[in-house]
Image (spheres, rainbow, N blue to C red):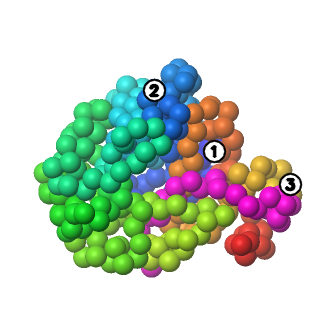
Amino acid sequence: MGVEQAGTFALGGDLPVHRLGFGAMRITGQGIWGEPPDLEEARKVLRRALELGVNLVDTADSYGPDVSERLIGETLAPYPKGLVIATKGGLVRPGPDEWKRDGRPEHLREACDGSLKRLKVERIDLYQLHAPDSKVPLEEQLGTLAELQREGKIRHIGVSNFDVKQLELAAALVKVVSVQNRYNLADRSSQDVLEWCEERGVAFIPWRPLGVEGLEGSPLAEVAKRNQATPSQVALAWLLASSKVMLPIPGTGSVKHLEENCAAAKIRLSEDEVRQLRDLR
């Protein structure tokens, strides 16, 4: 068995996905820039993810840029039934490890059209605003996504790197089906955003879900040993156990690491362990 053991969530109410997905940022070069160091390994990772039951793949036009989406389209299309490809627009890449926001309507339209071509789809299942651009009214940014949705280019709309105040405004403009913010055992600064999602049945997609920085020597190591798992696997298992709307998308460019991540779906933490890890600070 694979990630099916993580359970299922109906994304947008009509797209059932297994709650442990795959983030495709790391199938690019160093600094999330350019081609991956081992192109065939990157392709193997994508194919192996599907073999392990992954049916939610998350990417963005800024990963590479364009490289991640292109490899997904080249490697996996035509897509098997039930596979959900989520992508994002709204960030531009001047160079390695550089990320700048661009929420201008003309840019978002161009970004979406480029994603459609690279992913080889007529409609994107989930399109997320990668980050709000303070230079452009949020109404214009989300209004553009709403127009693309009406045109049939987007099925569902999500957002990323939003705070609760921004979410409230977004939800008044469009139907938000997902929020993608940084969240892990070591960084729970988006706890209020998670609670907002829980109250509304909105998917919460934590990026950097494997983060355990600063927790060395904590009870995390004891819990991992007790479950015959790695600390990173326990970090994923904890996310899955902590909320029914949680959809972790750990990423990697290695088949071995992918298999290790997916194996976290079978870990069943006790209530005491979940509580113990939740109280780590």
Identify the amino acid type marked 1: Cys
Q: Position of residue 169 (x, y in %)?
A: 28, 76
Point 69% across, 41% down: residue: 260
Q: Quadrant of the N terminus?
A: top right
Q: Main secondary structure of the magenta part?
A: loop
Residue 225, numbered label: 3
What span is in magenta?
Answer: 198-223
Image height of 39 relative to 262, above or below: above
| Horizontal relation, residue 185 to residue 114: left or right | right
Of the two numbered discs 2 and 1 on the same chain, state the one appearing first in sequence.
2
Q: Secondary structure at mark 1?
A: helix
Residue 262, numbered label: 1
Q: Position of residue 129 (x, y in %)?
A: 32, 57
Pick the residue in front: 21 or 28.
28
Mark 2 and mark 1 residues within 8 Å of each other at the beta carbon: no
Of the two numbered discs 3 and 1 on the same chain, state the one appearing first in sequence.
3
Residue 35, numbered label: 2
